[in-house]
Amino acid sequence: MIWKIAKKEFLLNLMTFKFAVGTLLCVVLTAAFVLVLVNDYQERLNRHSGNIAANETELKKVMVYKNITPTVYRPPTVLSVFSEGSYQQLGHSAKIELDSLPEITSALAEANPFLSVFPVLDVTLILKVVISILALLIAYDVISGERERGTLRLILSGTVARYEVLLGKLLAGLMTLIVPITITFIVGLLILELSPMVDLTRSDQVRIGLMYLASLIFISVMYNFGLLFSCLTRRSAISLILVLLCWVIYTVVIPNGSVCLATHIRPLQRGEKIDDQLVNLRKERQREQTELIANLGPFGGQRSGDIGAFGREYTRALTKSYSEYEQKRCALLASHFIKYADRFWEVEHRYLNSLLEQKQLANNLSRTSPISLYENVMCALAGTDAASCQYFVNRARTYRNEVIEYIRSKTNDFSLPSYFTPFSEEDMIAYGKLRERLHKAAGEEKGRVQGKLREMRQADKPVLGLHDFPRFVYKPESIAKTVQSALPDLVLLISISALFFALSSVVFLRYDVR
Protein backbone atom coordinates (compact mmCIF):
# COMPACT_ATOMS: atom_id res chain seq x y z
CA MET A 1 0.00 0.00 0.00
CA ILE A 2 2.90 2.37 0.71
CA TRP A 3 4.15 2.02 -2.85
CA LYS A 4 0.66 2.61 -4.32
CA ILE A 5 0.29 5.83 -2.35
CA ALA A 6 3.83 6.92 -3.29
CA LYS A 7 3.30 6.15 -6.98
CA LYS A 8 0.02 8.06 -7.13
CA GLU A 9 1.47 11.09 -5.31
CA PHE A 10 4.62 11.01 -7.43
CA LEU A 11 2.67 11.10 -10.71
CA LEU A 12 0.44 13.89 -9.42
CA ASN A 13 3.49 15.91 -8.35
CA LEU A 14 5.07 15.55 -11.79
CA MET A 15 2.02 17.14 -13.39
CA THR A 16 1.92 20.18 -11.09
CA PHE A 17 2.83 23.66 -12.26
CA LYS A 18 5.18 24.24 -9.33
CA PHE A 19 7.21 21.16 -10.22
CA ALA A 20 7.52 22.21 -13.86
CA VAL A 21 8.55 25.77 -12.95
CA GLY A 22 10.99 24.62 -10.27
CA THR A 23 12.68 22.07 -12.53
CA LEU A 24 12.90 24.50 -15.44
CA LEU A 25 14.33 27.18 -13.17
CA CYS A 26 16.96 24.75 -11.90
CA VAL A 27 18.03 23.83 -15.45
CA VAL A 28 18.21 27.43 -16.64
CA LEU A 29 20.03 28.73 -13.57
CA THR A 30 22.44 25.77 -13.50
CA ALA A 31 23.34 26.25 -17.16
CA ALA A 32 23.82 30.00 -16.69
CA PHE A 33 25.78 29.76 -13.43
CA VAL A 34 28.02 26.90 -14.52
CA LEU A 35 28.88 28.54 -17.84
CA VAL A 36 29.90 31.74 -16.05
CA LEU A 37 31.79 29.87 -13.33
CA VAL A 38 33.61 27.65 -15.83
CA ASN A 39 34.83 30.75 -17.66
CA ASP A 40 35.91 32.18 -14.31
CA TYR A 41 37.71 28.93 -13.52
CA GLN A 42 39.51 29.06 -16.86
CA GLU A 43 40.67 32.61 -16.13
CA ARG A 44 41.93 31.52 -12.71
CA LEU A 45 43.69 28.57 -14.30
CA ASN A 46 45.37 30.84 -16.84
CA ARG A 47 46.49 33.21 -14.08
CA HIS A 48 47.78 30.28 -12.06
CA SER A 49 49.72 28.92 -15.04
CA GLY A 50 51.10 32.40 -15.71
CA ASN A 51 52.20 32.74 -12.09
CA ILE A 52 53.93 29.35 -12.17
CA ALA A 53 55.66 30.21 -15.45
CA ALA A 54 56.81 33.58 -14.05
CA ASN A 55 58.15 31.78 -10.98
CA GLU A 56 60.12 29.35 -13.14
CA THR A 57 61.46 32.21 -15.25
CA GLU A 58 62.77 33.96 -12.15
CA LEU A 59 64.33 30.73 -10.85
CA LYS A 60 66.29 30.45 -14.11
CA LYS A 61 67.75 33.93 -13.45
CA VAL A 62 68.98 33.21 -9.92
CA MET A 63 72.72 33.82 -9.54
CA VAL A 64 72.95 33.69 -5.73
CA TYR A 65 71.15 31.50 -3.22
CA LYS A 66 70.10 34.54 -1.19
CA ASN A 67 67.71 35.55 -3.98
CA ILE A 68 65.71 32.31 -3.93
CA THR A 69 62.39 33.64 -2.65
CA PRO A 70 59.74 31.98 -4.84
CA THR A 71 56.02 32.35 -4.38
CA VAL A 72 53.93 29.20 -4.19
CA TYR A 73 50.39 29.19 -5.52
CA ARG A 74 47.35 27.15 -4.69
CA PRO A 75 45.79 25.84 -7.92
CA PRO A 76 42.13 26.68 -8.54
CA THR A 77 39.65 23.90 -7.95
CA VAL A 78 37.06 23.12 -10.59
CA LEU A 79 34.66 22.00 -7.86
CA SER A 80 34.23 25.64 -6.85
CA VAL A 81 31.61 25.60 -9.61
CA PHE A 82 29.46 23.53 -7.26
CA SER A 83 30.41 25.34 -4.07
CA GLU A 84 32.47 28.54 -4.06
CA GLY A 85 32.66 28.63 -0.27
CA SER A 86 35.51 30.77 1.06
CA TYR A 87 37.72 30.19 -1.97
CA GLN A 88 37.62 33.78 -3.26
CA GLN A 89 38.02 35.27 0.21
CA LEU A 90 41.15 33.39 1.26
CA GLY A 91 44.75 33.70 0.10
CA HIS A 92 46.00 31.53 -2.76
CA SER A 93 49.70 32.33 -2.61
CA ALA A 94 52.55 32.37 -0.11
CA LYS A 95 55.98 33.99 -0.33
CA ILE A 96 58.85 31.74 0.72
CA GLU A 97 61.33 33.82 2.74
CA LEU A 98 63.73 33.36 5.61
CA ASP A 99 62.23 36.10 7.75
CA SER A 100 58.54 35.18 7.58
CA LEU A 101 56.24 32.18 7.71
CA PRO A 102 53.24 31.67 5.41
CA GLU A 103 49.89 32.33 7.08
CA ILE A 104 46.21 32.63 6.15
CA THR A 105 45.59 36.09 4.76
CA SER A 106 42.84 38.31 3.44
CA ALA A 107 39.15 38.39 4.11
CA LEU A 108 39.03 36.17 7.14
CA ALA A 109 39.48 39.51 8.81
CA GLU A 110 36.71 41.16 6.84
CA ALA A 111 35.67 44.18 8.81
CA ASN A 112 32.09 44.18 7.61
CA PRO A 113 30.27 40.99 8.66
CA PHE A 114 27.16 42.09 6.76
CA LEU A 115 28.90 41.32 3.47
CA SER A 116 28.05 37.68 4.13
CA VAL A 117 24.42 38.55 3.38
CA PHE A 118 25.20 38.54 -0.34
CA PRO A 119 25.28 34.96 -1.61
CA VAL A 120 27.95 33.50 -3.89
CA LEU A 121 26.69 32.27 -7.23
CA ASP A 122 27.20 28.52 -7.52
CA VAL A 123 25.22 25.29 -7.85
CA THR A 124 24.81 25.11 -4.07
CA LEU A 125 22.90 28.40 -4.18
CA ILE A 126 20.42 26.88 -6.65
CA LEU A 127 19.93 23.82 -4.49
CA LYS A 128 19.60 25.64 -1.19
CA VAL A 129 17.17 28.23 -2.59
CA VAL A 130 15.20 26.85 -5.54
CA ILE A 131 15.13 23.15 -4.63
CA SER A 132 14.55 23.79 -0.94
CA ILE A 133 11.58 26.07 -1.70
CA LEU A 134 10.26 23.49 -4.15
CA ALA A 135 10.53 20.85 -1.43
CA LEU A 136 8.53 23.03 0.95
CA LEU A 137 5.91 23.83 -1.72
CA ILE A 138 5.43 20.13 -2.39
CA ALA A 139 5.32 19.15 1.29
CA TYR A 140 3.35 21.94 2.94
CA ASP A 141 -0.09 20.58 1.95
CA VAL A 142 0.45 16.84 1.64
CA ILE A 143 -1.55 16.28 4.85
CA SER A 144 -3.41 19.53 5.51
CA GLY A 145 -4.38 19.80 1.83
CA GLU A 146 -5.78 16.27 1.82
CA ARG A 147 -7.77 17.12 4.93
CA GLU A 148 -9.22 20.28 3.33
CA ARG A 149 -10.24 18.34 0.23
CA GLY A 150 -11.79 15.61 2.36
CA THR A 151 -9.68 12.85 0.81
CA LEU A 152 -7.65 12.16 3.95
CA ARG A 153 -10.72 10.96 5.85
CA LEU A 154 -11.63 8.76 2.90
CA ILE A 155 -8.13 7.19 2.75
CA LEU A 156 -8.02 6.48 6.49
CA SER A 157 -11.57 5.08 6.54
CA GLY A 158 -10.29 1.87 5.00
CA THR A 159 -7.60 -0.53 6.17
CA VAL A 160 -4.70 1.77 5.40
CA ALA A 161 -2.64 2.56 8.50
CA ARG A 162 -1.59 6.11 9.20
CA TYR A 163 2.10 5.29 9.13
CA GLU A 164 1.63 3.84 5.62
CA VAL A 165 0.09 7.08 4.44
CA LEU A 166 2.92 9.12 5.93
CA LEU A 167 5.63 6.84 4.51
CA GLY A 168 3.95 6.91 1.11
CA LYS A 169 3.85 10.70 1.17
CA LEU A 170 7.52 10.84 2.18
CA LEU A 171 8.60 8.41 -0.52
CA ALA A 172 6.60 10.29 -3.18
CA GLY A 173 8.07 13.63 -2.17
CA LEU A 174 11.63 12.35 -2.25
CA MET A 175 11.09 10.65 -5.62
CA THR A 176 9.74 13.92 -6.98
CA LEU A 177 12.64 16.01 -5.69
CA ILE A 178 15.27 13.58 -6.95
CA VAL A 179 14.29 14.54 -10.50
CA PRO A 180 15.33 18.24 -10.44
CA ILE A 181 18.40 17.50 -8.31
CA THR A 182 19.55 14.83 -10.74
CA ILE A 183 18.91 17.08 -13.74
CA THR A 184 20.84 19.91 -12.04
CA PHE A 185 23.91 17.74 -11.49
CA ILE A 186 23.70 16.22 -14.98
CA VAL A 187 23.55 19.65 -16.62
CA GLY A 188 26.46 20.87 -14.50
CA LEU A 189 28.56 17.79 -15.30
CA LEU A 190 27.82 17.97 -19.04
CA ILE A 191 28.98 21.59 -19.21
CA LEU A 192 32.13 20.72 -17.26
CA GLU A 193 32.92 17.70 -19.43
CA LEU A 194 32.40 19.71 -22.63
CA SER A 195 34.65 22.55 -21.47
CA PRO A 196 38.09 22.24 -23.12
CA MET A 197 40.11 23.44 -20.11
CA VAL A 198 38.29 21.32 -17.53
CA ASP A 199 39.73 17.91 -16.75
CA LEU A 200 37.80 16.12 -14.05
CA THR A 201 39.93 13.63 -12.18
CA ARG A 202 38.68 10.45 -10.57
CA SER A 203 38.82 12.21 -7.22
CA ASP A 204 36.69 15.08 -8.57
CA GLN A 205 34.08 12.66 -9.84
CA VAL A 206 33.90 10.90 -6.48
CA ARG A 207 33.54 14.24 -4.70
CA ILE A 208 30.73 15.28 -7.07
CA GLY A 209 29.00 11.99 -6.34
CA LEU A 210 29.28 12.69 -2.62
CA MET A 211 27.86 16.18 -3.19
CA TYR A 212 24.92 14.60 -4.98
CA LEU A 213 24.25 12.29 -2.03
CA ALA A 214 24.59 15.22 0.40
CA SER A 215 22.07 17.17 -1.69
CA LEU A 216 19.59 14.30 -1.46
CA ILE A 217 19.99 14.23 2.32
CA PHE A 218 19.54 18.00 2.52
CA ILE A 219 16.41 17.96 0.41
CA SER A 220 14.96 15.19 2.59
CA VAL A 221 15.45 17.52 5.57
CA MET A 222 13.55 20.33 3.86
CA TYR A 223 10.78 18.01 2.72
CA ASN A 224 10.37 16.51 6.20
CA PHE A 225 10.32 20.04 7.60
CA GLY A 226 7.42 20.96 5.33
CA LEU A 227 5.74 17.64 6.12
CA LEU A 228 5.93 18.41 9.83
CA PHE A 229 4.13 21.73 9.44
CA SER A 230 1.57 20.09 7.19
CA CYS A 231 0.82 17.68 10.05
CA LEU A 232 0.80 20.44 12.66
CA THR A 233 -1.75 22.68 10.93
CA ARG A 234 -5.29 22.09 9.76
CA ARG A 235 -5.13 24.61 6.92
CA SER A 236 -2.57 24.48 4.10
CA ALA A 237 -2.40 28.29 3.82
CA ILE A 238 -1.19 28.56 7.41
CA SER A 239 1.29 25.77 6.80
CA LEU A 240 2.66 27.59 3.74
CA ILE A 241 3.13 30.85 5.63
CA LEU A 242 4.89 29.13 8.51
CA VAL A 243 7.30 27.09 6.34
CA LEU A 244 8.25 30.10 4.24
CA LEU A 245 8.82 32.18 7.37
CA CYS A 246 11.06 29.47 8.82
CA TRP A 247 12.84 29.16 5.46
CA VAL A 248 13.75 32.86 5.60
CA ILE A 249 15.01 32.39 9.16
CA TYR A 250 17.09 29.37 8.14
CA THR A 251 18.47 30.99 4.98
CA VAL A 252 19.08 34.61 6.00
CA VAL A 253 18.58 35.28 9.69
CA ILE A 254 20.52 32.43 11.30
CA PRO A 255 23.63 32.43 9.03
CA ASN A 256 24.10 36.19 9.13
CA GLY A 257 22.89 36.61 12.69
CA SER A 258 25.45 34.01 13.79
CA VAL A 259 28.27 36.11 12.31
CA CYS A 260 27.11 39.25 14.09
CA LEU A 261 26.52 37.39 17.36
CA ALA A 262 29.96 35.75 17.23
CA THR A 263 31.67 39.14 16.77
CA HIS A 264 30.02 40.34 19.98
CA ILE A 265 30.51 37.18 22.02
CA ARG A 266 34.14 36.71 21.00
CA PRO A 267 35.58 40.03 19.75
CA LEU A 268 39.03 40.06 18.21
CA GLN A 269 41.88 41.00 20.50
CA ARG A 270 44.30 42.46 17.96
CA GLY A 271 44.10 46.17 18.77
CA GLU A 272 46.97 47.86 20.54
CA LYS A 273 48.09 44.77 22.45
CA ILE A 274 49.27 42.65 19.52
CA ASP A 275 50.45 45.68 17.54
CA ASP A 276 52.59 46.76 20.48
CA GLN A 277 54.01 43.24 20.76
CA LEU A 278 54.97 43.31 17.08
CA VAL A 279 56.56 46.75 17.40
CA ASN A 280 58.56 45.65 20.44
CA LEU A 281 59.61 42.48 18.69
CA ARG A 282 60.84 44.47 15.67
CA LYS A 283 62.86 46.72 17.96
CA GLU A 284 64.31 43.69 19.74
CA ARG A 285 65.20 42.07 16.42
CA GLN A 286 66.88 45.25 15.20
CA ARG A 287 68.78 45.67 18.46
CA GLU A 288 70.03 42.09 18.41
CA GLN A 289 70.91 42.41 14.73
CA THR A 290 72.96 45.53 15.47
CA GLU A 291 74.80 43.74 18.27
CA LEU A 292 75.58 40.76 16.05
CA ILE A 293 77.01 42.99 13.34
CA ALA A 294 78.96 45.07 15.88
CA ASN A 295 80.58 41.91 17.27
CA LEU A 296 81.99 41.20 13.84
CA GLY A 297 84.12 44.31 14.13
CA PRO A 298 84.87 46.84 11.39
CA PHE A 299 84.85 45.70 7.79
CA GLY A 300 86.96 46.77 4.89
CA GLY A 301 86.79 46.40 1.18
CA GLN A 302 84.33 47.49 -1.46
CA ARG A 303 81.17 46.11 -3.01
CA SER A 304 78.73 46.86 -5.81
CA GLY A 305 75.09 45.81 -5.51
CA ASP A 306 72.39 45.11 -8.07
CA ILE A 307 68.81 43.83 -8.33
CA GLY A 308 68.51 40.21 -9.39
CA ALA A 309 65.90 37.44 -9.52
CA PHE A 310 62.61 37.93 -7.66
CA GLY A 311 63.47 41.63 -7.33
CA ARG A 312 66.01 40.94 -4.59
CA GLU A 313 69.32 42.72 -4.16
CA TYR A 314 72.58 40.81 -4.38
CA THR A 315 76.26 41.68 -4.38
CA ARG A 316 77.40 41.85 -8.00
CA ALA A 317 81.07 42.72 -7.40
CA LEU A 318 83.19 42.87 -4.24
CA THR A 319 86.69 42.57 -2.88
CA LYS A 320 88.09 39.54 -1.06
CA SER A 321 88.14 41.38 2.29
CA TYR A 322 84.49 42.39 1.97
CA SER A 323 83.57 38.81 1.03
CA GLU A 324 85.16 37.43 4.19
CA TYR A 325 83.21 39.90 6.28
CA GLU A 326 79.96 39.25 4.40
CA GLN A 327 80.30 35.49 4.82
CA LYS A 328 80.34 35.88 8.60
CA ARG A 329 77.53 38.44 8.56
CA CYS A 330 75.21 36.32 6.38
CA ALA A 331 75.81 33.18 8.46
CA LEU A 332 74.79 35.06 11.61
CA LEU A 333 71.86 37.00 10.16
CA ALA A 334 70.28 34.04 8.35
CA SER A 335 69.86 32.13 11.61
CA HIS A 336 68.77 35.38 13.26
CA PHE A 337 66.00 35.95 10.69
CA ILE A 338 64.79 32.36 10.89
CA LYS A 339 64.55 32.55 14.70
CA TYR A 340 62.61 35.81 14.65
CA ALA A 341 60.33 34.62 11.85
CA ASP A 342 59.10 31.94 14.26
CA ARG A 343 58.65 34.51 17.03
CA PHE A 344 56.73 36.93 14.78
CA TRP A 345 54.52 34.07 13.65
CA GLU A 346 53.73 33.14 17.25
CA VAL A 347 52.49 36.68 17.96
CA GLU A 348 50.54 37.05 14.73
CA HIS A 349 49.13 33.54 15.08
CA ARG A 350 47.43 34.52 18.34
CA TYR A 351 45.36 37.03 16.42
CA LEU A 352 44.67 34.58 13.62
CA ASN A 353 43.70 31.94 16.17
CA SER A 354 41.22 34.32 17.77
CA LEU A 355 39.91 35.10 14.29
CA LEU A 356 39.48 31.44 13.46
CA GLU A 357 37.85 30.82 16.83
CA GLN A 358 35.39 33.62 16.08
CA LYS A 359 34.65 32.08 12.67
CA GLN A 360 34.24 28.67 14.28
CA LEU A 361 31.83 30.09 16.86
CA ALA A 362 29.78 31.70 14.09
CA ASN A 363 29.81 28.39 12.24
CA ASN A 364 28.67 26.49 15.33
CA LEU A 365 25.87 28.97 15.98
CA SER A 366 24.71 28.71 12.36
CA ARG A 367 24.51 24.93 12.63
CA THR A 368 21.00 25.37 13.97
CA SER A 369 20.10 25.93 10.31
CA PRO A 370 20.08 22.87 8.02
CA ILE A 371 20.93 25.20 5.13
CA SER A 372 24.17 26.22 6.86
CA LEU A 373 24.95 22.57 7.56
CA TYR A 374 24.45 21.78 3.88
CA GLU A 375 26.73 24.64 2.85
CA ASN A 376 29.43 23.36 5.21
CA VAL A 377 29.22 19.88 3.72
CA MET A 378 29.38 21.15 0.14
CA CYS A 379 32.34 23.45 0.88
CA ALA A 380 34.25 20.64 2.58
CA LEU A 381 33.63 18.22 -0.31
CA ALA A 382 34.58 20.88 -2.90
CA GLY A 383 37.75 21.83 -1.02
CA THR A 384 36.75 25.50 -0.78
CA ASP A 385 36.40 25.87 2.98
CA ALA A 386 38.78 27.54 5.43
CA ALA A 387 40.24 24.16 6.43
CA SER A 388 41.39 23.58 2.83
CA CYS A 389 43.11 26.97 2.82
CA GLN A 390 44.81 26.13 6.11
CA TYR A 391 45.97 22.86 4.56
CA PHE A 392 47.60 24.84 1.71
CA VAL A 393 49.29 27.16 4.22
CA ASN A 394 50.63 24.16 6.14
CA ARG A 395 52.03 22.73 2.91
CA ALA A 396 53.64 26.11 2.16
CA ARG A 397 55.31 26.10 5.58
CA THR A 398 56.66 22.62 4.97
CA TYR A 399 57.97 23.75 1.59
CA ARG A 400 59.64 26.78 3.20
CA ASN A 401 61.56 24.41 5.48
CA GLU A 402 62.62 22.39 2.43
CA VAL A 403 63.87 25.53 0.67
CA ILE A 404 65.78 26.69 3.76
CA GLU A 405 67.44 23.30 4.15
CA TYR A 406 68.31 23.26 0.45
CA ILE A 407 70.00 26.68 0.66
CA ARG A 408 71.67 25.74 3.92
CA SER A 409 73.17 22.58 2.39
CA LYS A 410 74.36 24.41 -0.73
CA THR A 411 76.00 27.29 1.16
CA ASN A 412 77.45 25.53 4.19
CA ASP A 413 74.91 27.05 6.56
CA PHE A 414 74.68 30.37 4.63
CA SER A 415 78.42 31.02 4.95
CA LEU A 416 79.72 30.52 1.39
CA PRO A 417 80.14 33.45 -1.05
CA SER A 418 77.65 31.78 -3.43
CA TYR A 419 74.94 32.74 -0.94
CA PHE A 420 75.27 36.46 -1.69
CA THR A 421 77.47 36.93 -4.80
CA PRO A 422 78.21 35.26 -8.17
CA PHE A 423 81.78 36.54 -8.01
CA SER A 424 84.46 33.86 -7.89
CA GLU A 425 87.47 34.13 -5.60
CA GLU A 426 89.69 35.02 -8.58
CA ASP A 427 87.26 37.80 -9.54
CA MET A 428 87.33 39.15 -5.97
CA ILE A 429 91.12 39.29 -5.93
CA ALA A 430 91.28 40.96 -9.35
CA TYR A 431 88.54 43.41 -8.35
CA GLY A 432 90.43 44.30 -5.16
CA LYS A 433 93.68 44.94 -7.06
CA LEU A 434 91.86 47.19 -9.50
CA ARG A 435 90.33 49.14 -6.60
CA GLU A 436 93.83 49.63 -5.16
CA ARG A 437 95.16 50.79 -8.53
CA LEU A 438 92.24 53.20 -8.82
CA HIS A 439 93.29 54.98 -5.63
CA LYS A 440 96.86 55.41 -6.93
CA ALA A 441 96.06 56.09 -10.58
CA ALA A 442 95.63 59.49 -12.18
CA GLY A 443 94.74 60.89 -15.55
CA GLU A 444 94.29 58.40 -18.38
CA GLU A 445 95.39 55.50 -16.20
CA LYS A 446 92.54 56.22 -13.77
CA GLY A 447 90.05 56.20 -16.64
CA ARG A 448 91.35 52.85 -17.88
CA VAL A 449 91.06 51.33 -14.39
CA GLN A 450 87.51 52.69 -13.97
CA GLY A 451 86.62 51.14 -17.32
CA LYS A 452 87.94 47.73 -16.24
CA LEU A 453 86.04 47.97 -12.96
CA ARG A 454 82.88 48.83 -14.83
CA GLU A 455 83.41 45.88 -17.16
CA MET A 456 83.78 43.55 -14.17
CA ARG A 457 80.60 44.86 -12.58
CA GLN A 458 78.62 44.60 -15.81
CA ALA A 459 80.03 41.26 -16.96
CA ASP A 460 77.49 38.45 -17.29
CA LYS A 461 77.69 35.89 -14.51
CA PRO A 462 76.51 32.28 -14.64
CA VAL A 463 73.16 31.39 -13.09
CA LEU A 464 72.93 28.69 -10.45
CA GLY A 465 70.88 26.29 -12.57
CA LEU A 466 68.91 24.91 -9.62
CA HIS A 467 68.22 21.60 -11.36
CA ASP A 468 67.91 19.88 -8.00
CA PHE A 469 65.91 22.68 -6.38
CA PRO A 470 62.73 21.30 -4.74
CA ARG A 471 59.56 22.40 -6.52
CA PHE A 472 56.29 23.02 -4.72
CA VAL A 473 53.69 20.40 -5.53
CA TYR A 474 50.23 20.94 -4.12
CA LYS A 475 47.97 17.95 -3.73
CA PRO A 476 44.52 18.39 -2.23
CA GLU A 477 43.55 16.42 0.82
CA SER A 478 42.53 12.83 0.30
CA ILE A 479 38.88 11.92 -0.08
CA ALA A 480 39.02 10.14 3.26
CA LYS A 481 40.15 13.35 5.00
CA THR A 482 37.51 15.35 3.14
CA VAL A 483 34.73 12.97 4.15
CA GLN A 484 36.02 13.04 7.72
CA SER A 485 35.73 16.85 7.85
CA ALA A 486 32.27 16.83 6.23
CA LEU A 487 30.92 13.91 8.27
CA PRO A 488 29.84 15.78 11.45
CA ASP A 489 27.61 18.19 9.49
CA LEU A 490 26.33 15.36 7.33
CA VAL A 491 25.39 13.32 10.40
CA LEU A 492 23.60 16.36 11.83
CA LEU A 493 21.61 16.71 8.60
CA ILE A 494 20.59 13.06 8.72
CA SER A 495 19.66 13.38 12.40
CA ILE A 496 17.56 16.50 11.76
CA SER A 497 15.76 14.79 8.89
CA ALA A 498 15.02 11.77 11.08
CA LEU A 499 13.86 14.05 13.90
CA PHE A 500 11.49 15.98 11.66
CA PHE A 501 9.97 12.76 10.32
CA ALA A 502 9.66 11.28 13.82
CA LEU A 503 7.84 14.41 15.00
CA SER A 504 5.61 14.27 11.93
CA SER A 505 4.75 10.65 12.74
CA VAL A 506 3.88 11.47 16.35
CA VAL A 507 1.71 14.42 15.32
CA PHE A 508 0.01 12.57 12.47
CA LEU A 509 -0.97 9.66 14.70
CA ARG A 510 -3.11 12.14 16.66
CA TYR A 511 -4.15 14.22 13.68
CA ASP A 512 -7.83 15.06 13.48
CA VAL A 513 -8.91 14.27 9.92
CA ARG A 514 -12.37 15.82 10.29
Image: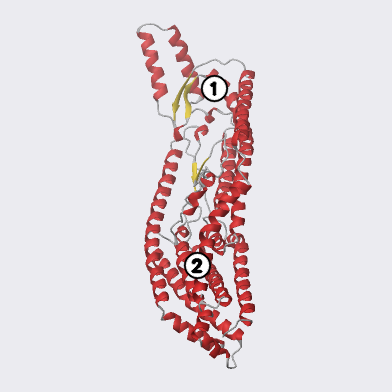
Residue 497 located left or right of residue 77: right
| Residue at horizontal 58 percent and vertical 75 percent from the top | 232
Find residue 114 and report its horizontal and vertical position in percent. 50, 49
Real-space CA distance between mark 1 and mark 2, rounded to the nearest whole angstrom: 76 Å
Find residue 489 and report its horizontal and vertical position in percent. 60, 63
- Label 1: element kind: helix
Query: Which residue is tagged 2?
Result: 244
Q: Based on the displayed image, in which of its 4 quarters is residue 126 positioned?
A: bottom left
Query: Which residue is tagged 1?
Result: 323
- Which of the pair 143/109 is nearer the observer? 143
Identify the amino acid type marked 1.
Answer: Ser
Q: Can residue 212 be seen in this view?
A: no
Find residue 342 and report its horizontal and vertical position in percent. 63, 37
**Against 340, is 367 above or below?**
below
Find residue 480 and report its horizontal and vertical position in percent. 60, 62
Q: Quadrant of the N terminus?
A: bottom right
Q: What is the residue that sits farthest to the bottom in this orientation?
A: 158
- Label 2: element kind: helix
**Against 138, is 249 above or below?**
above
- Which of the pair 409/238 is nearer the observer? 238
Which colouring convention does the figure follow? secondary structure
The circle drawn on residue 114 is: none
Query: Which is more N-terminal, label 2 or label 1?
Result: 2
Identify the amino acid type marked 2.
Answer: Leu
Q: Can residue 131 be seen in this view?
A: yes
Q: Nearer the viewer, mark 1 or mark 2?
A: 2
Near mark 2 (Cα within 10 A), the count class, few <14, some 14-19 or many ≥20, is some
